[in-house]
Each structure stands twice: as C-alpha cells, then as structure tokens.
C-alpha cells in the first residue's frame, strides 16, 4: 500500500482555549487547579534570544552522555511478513544529528531533559496520527504524551477525584483501573454489558435513579471509564450505533468520558467461521480506516472525551509511550503534573520510536504496520476460535467471537455443575480454575474483573488470550481447559 494519507497539521500546542468546554467546570479538583507552570521550565523560552549565554537551566552537557550512536534494526514497509533479520533496515541516530542537519532529532536532545508534553518531534507525529484517524470535531483539542495508559488513567483520576465519589465503569472492567481508583476513594459502579459492551440504557437508568443514600452518600457520578474496542476482559467491541448512544447518554447527564483504547488498532477482520474463506484484507489506507469503528473522540462535539492511547499493543509495551487527546485545558492540567512528576516520557524511548514512526515509516508506513498487526491478530483469534469449537463442551460453555483486542471471554453455565446447589459460585470458579491449571492450562478467573468490590456475582466467566502463545500451544491449552471443565462437570468427551 503506497498511498499517502494527506494530513493538515495545525499547531495545536499554540492554541489556547478557543472554546471553554463545560463538562469540566467545577470538576477538576483543587490539587489539579493549583498546578502552575514549572518555574525552571518556563525560563527555557528565553533561550531563543540571540547571543544569550545560558547559565540557567541545569541541563547536563551532552558530552557527558556516554552514548555516541544508537542503531536499531527495524522492519520495512512491504516486508512486514518477512524476516526483519533479513529484510530489515538499520536506522542510526547520532549524537549531534540536529546540528549537523542529518536529522530532526538526535541523542544530545532526546537524552537530555525534556518537557512534560514529550518531545515536539514525536508529539507532532502522534498529533497528526490522531487527526488522520479520529479528526476530533471541536477546535481546541490537543495531544500530550504520557508514559502509557496505566499512568494516563492514574493522572486523569487524580485530576478529578473528590472525597467519596463513584465512577461509572463496565460491570467487568480492566482490574488495574479499579486498583488505581479505589485507593483514591473512587468506587466503581458497574454498568450492565452485552456482547457489544456497555449498555447505554443501563447507564441512563443508573444516572436517572441515582440515590446517594445507596452509595455511601456519594453524589451522582460524572466520570465514565470505558474501553470501547476489544474490552479487557470481555473482548467486547461497541458498534457505531452503540457508541453514539453512549455519547448521547453522556451528553444527557453531562459526563466526562475517559475512553481507554489500547486495542483500537487490534480491530480484526470479520470472523467468517472455520474453513470458510477469509474476508479480504483492506485494499487501501482509506478502506482500513473506514473499517475501524469510529472512536468516541471522533464524535466528541462537546469536548467531553479524554482519550487514552498507547503504543503498548501496537509497537511495544516497554516503550512506555502513549498520549492523551483532550481539550487544551485538560492537556495543560496533565502536562503541568507531568512537569513535576515523570518529566515526560523517556527520551531514549522517544528517539527510538520517532526514528521508526516518523523518519522511517511515516504515516503511510505506520498504517501499513497497523494493517499487518490487524491481520496477525485475526489469524490468532481464528486459531483460538477453531480450538474452542473443536474442544470445548458446548453443553456448559458459550462465547461470542471477539472483534477486537486480545481476549476471548468464555461463559460457564455453572448451574449445570453437579455441585451447583451446595457450592458457592466463586468456590466453583476456583475449583474449575485450579483443575485447569492442574491439567496444564492457565486461564484467568472472570470474578477478578468485577467492577463493584462487593457486587453480587451471578455469572461465571474465564478470560483467555490469544496474544502470544504459538498456534499449537493455543490449541493444546484450550483442549486442556475443555478437559478440565468436562471432568468438573462429569461430562463425557
Ligand atoms: N488499558 C487497558 C484496557 C488495558 O488492557 C491495558 C493493558 N493490559 C492498559 C490500559 C495498559 O496500557 P499501557 O501499557 O499503555 O499502560
């Protein structure tokens, strides 16, 4: 795919607030409001003055960085299916490539202190990418870089937390999210889900009937945390009509939406069934982008979405690179915090990723890579589904083919267990889980993802992932899990 995506990059970092979004009024807490520009960083603006001798900022001289050159071997567009060892290209970053005019980024700059927003070089690329993919429909959106979405959520919650508050989340949610929220005094309120994820009418019902007395006197919630594509743990993906409905309920109740989308580009090809011909891959970038369910950000006319993006699932988790997209006002609160905490993402990581994404691949090459990842995950998912169809007892297990992400969510009809009447659901879940481990297959218990700490647990699920194991091992693990369930339920193979 050689087609180039045209992008009109506007200098968003210059735009102050053109519109004042209302969803944040009175909601950003005193701690976040009190964050002022870091004084030491503000002095750097004078460095542009001709002839100025700086004895100001405490930036070490790059001569003392014990790194002269960095080389990375990376895949080349057109060869993603072939060995990088054989067909890859070596990219080299020198210490002074910027001053010698060899490159727009170099070791002496990237490895020194930077800004809480991340480097201008990588931030420009990520902002352009956001414009290409989501094109947020309001004026003053911005991106600011993060050290990954785990941290983005932590920082965002810290911006909005108030004593004794609740946050709306999917009834089964990314466990780390609640583990970050609870110690801040933020309790989760689970919204019912179906195979398309969060059910908007249930969200509306909860908000319409909110009674503080039933929630430890917490006021009506204004934060909604949601993972619309390839949700962790359920694998559910919200369709476009579903997203529109969620957004409409958010407008009705004036919610701030935290859209956590690490699996956005792991939206896979449609599942055609075992043995049936595969759906043809996207023939162009335009077709690829059109095949992705539009994000909540892309329909955010009010500026109420704080979108968390991450390179963890599409480049590498150890890069610890991500970004948020939100109104300028929110981005500013975010990078003011970063200035005095992380000081922005790791410069070494930013240089490596910038070399790959901007200097080597460009937007077109990156989209090619994302298509490649999509097809890889499609194959993995299809192997997992094939094994489930072959080995799992349908009498007691059921599932829906996931359309995105890396997780497959299997429901157990535990009431058919011979001991269902005398045993607690959670004890039974543990029993099946341990039996599966004993037989050599580790899966994850669904109850670990329940949003409400003390909520009733009526259904039993197990989460499996097709992200990493070799195909034959995925099949073998599913076979063993099926055997464990059969043994537990006294079913004949
Ligand atoms: N959000 C969700 C929903 C996830 O599943 C994960 C990874 N397990 C993360 C965030 C973490 O992303 P990151 O590596 O960017 O911190």
Image (cartoon, grey):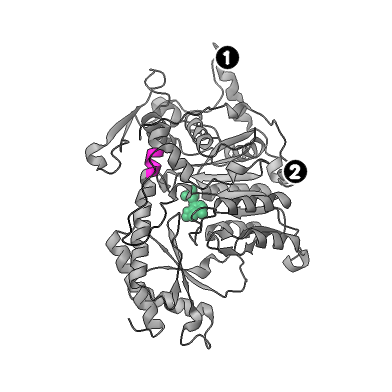
Give above or below for 12 relative to 154. above
Is residue 215 rendered to the left or right of residue 490?
right
Q: In the figure, residue 71 lies in which quadrant?
A: top left
Any magenta on residue 474? no
The quarter in which the N terminus is drawn is: top left
Q: Main secondary structure of the magenta part?
A: helix
Q: Residue at x 66, y 61 (%)?
A: 201
Whether ligand 1 has any atom under 8 Å from the Cβ at mark 2 is answered as: no
Is residue 428 rendered to the left or right of residue 375?
right
Q: Are marks 2 and 1 in contact (CB under 8 Å)?
A: no
| Secondary element at tag 1 | loop
Q: Residue at x 40, y 57 (%)?
A: 271
**Neighbour tally class for label 1: few under 14, some 14-19, many 20 plus, Cα within 10 Å:** few
Q: Position of residue 370 (x, y in %)?
A: 40, 43
* Magenta highlight range: 367-371
Q: Which residue is mark 1?
A: 49
Residue 25 — which label? 2
């Amino acid at each position: 795919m050689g087609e180039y995506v045209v992008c009109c990059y506007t200098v968003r970092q210059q735009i102050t607030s053109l519109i004042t979004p209302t969803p944040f009024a009175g909601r950003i807490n005193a701690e976040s409001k009190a964050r002022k520009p870091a004084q030491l960083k503000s002095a750097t603006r004078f460095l542009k003055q001709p002839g100025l001798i700086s004895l100001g900022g405490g930036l070490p001289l790059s001569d003392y960085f014990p790194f002269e050159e960095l080389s990375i071997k990376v895949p080349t567009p057109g060869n993603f299916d072939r060995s990088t060892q054989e067909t890859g290209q070596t990219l080299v970053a020198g210490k002074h490539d910027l001053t010698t005019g060899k490159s727009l980024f170099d070791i002496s700059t990237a490895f020194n202190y930077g800004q809480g927003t991340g480097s201008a070089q990588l931030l420009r690329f990520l902002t352009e990418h956001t414009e290409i993919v989501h094109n947020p429909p309001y004026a003053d959106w911005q991106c600011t870089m993060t050290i990954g979405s785990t941290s983005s959520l932590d920082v965002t919650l810290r911006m909005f937390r108030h004593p004794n508050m609740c946050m709306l989340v999917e009834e089964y949610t990314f466990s780390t999210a609640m583990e970050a929220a609870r110690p801040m005094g933020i309790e989760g309120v689970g919204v019912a889900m179906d195979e398309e994820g969060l059910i908007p009418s249930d969200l509306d019902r909860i908000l319409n009937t909110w009674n503080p007395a039933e929630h430890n006197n917490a006021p009506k919630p204004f934060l909604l945390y949601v993972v619309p594509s390839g949700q962790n743990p359920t694998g559910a993906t919200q369709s476009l009509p579903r997203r529109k409905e969620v957004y409409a309920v958010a407008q009705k109740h004036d919610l701030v939406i935290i859209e956590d989308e690490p699996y956005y580009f792991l939206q896979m090809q449609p599942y055609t069934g075992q043995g049936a011909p595969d759906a043809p891959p996207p023939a162009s970038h335009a077709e690829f982008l059109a095949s992705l369910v539009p994000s909540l950000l892309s329909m955010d006319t009010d500026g109420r979405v704080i979108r968390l993006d991450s390179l963890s699932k599409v480049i590498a988790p150890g890069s610890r690179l991500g970004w948020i997209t939100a109104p300028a006002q929110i981005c500013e609160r975010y990078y003011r915090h970063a200035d005095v905490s992380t000081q922005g993402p790791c410069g070494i990581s930013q240089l490596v990723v910038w070399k790959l994404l901007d200097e080597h691949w460009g937007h077109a090459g990156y989209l090619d890579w994302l298509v490649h990842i999509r097809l890889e995950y499609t194959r993995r998912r299809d192997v997992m589904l094939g094994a489930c169809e072959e080995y799992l007892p349908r009498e007691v297990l059921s599932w829906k083919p996931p359309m995105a992400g890396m997780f497959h969510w299997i429901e157990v009809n535990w009431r058919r267990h011979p001991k269902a009447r005398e045993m607690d659901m959670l004890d039974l879940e543990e029993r099946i889980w341990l039996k599966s481990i004993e037989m050599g297959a580790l899966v994850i218990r669904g109850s670990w993802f329940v949003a409400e700490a003390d909520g009733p647990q009526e259904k039993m699920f197990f989460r499996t992932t097709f992200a990493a194991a070799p195909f034959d091992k995925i099949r073998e693990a599913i076979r063993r899990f099926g055997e464990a369930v059969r043994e537990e339920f006294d079913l004949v193979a």
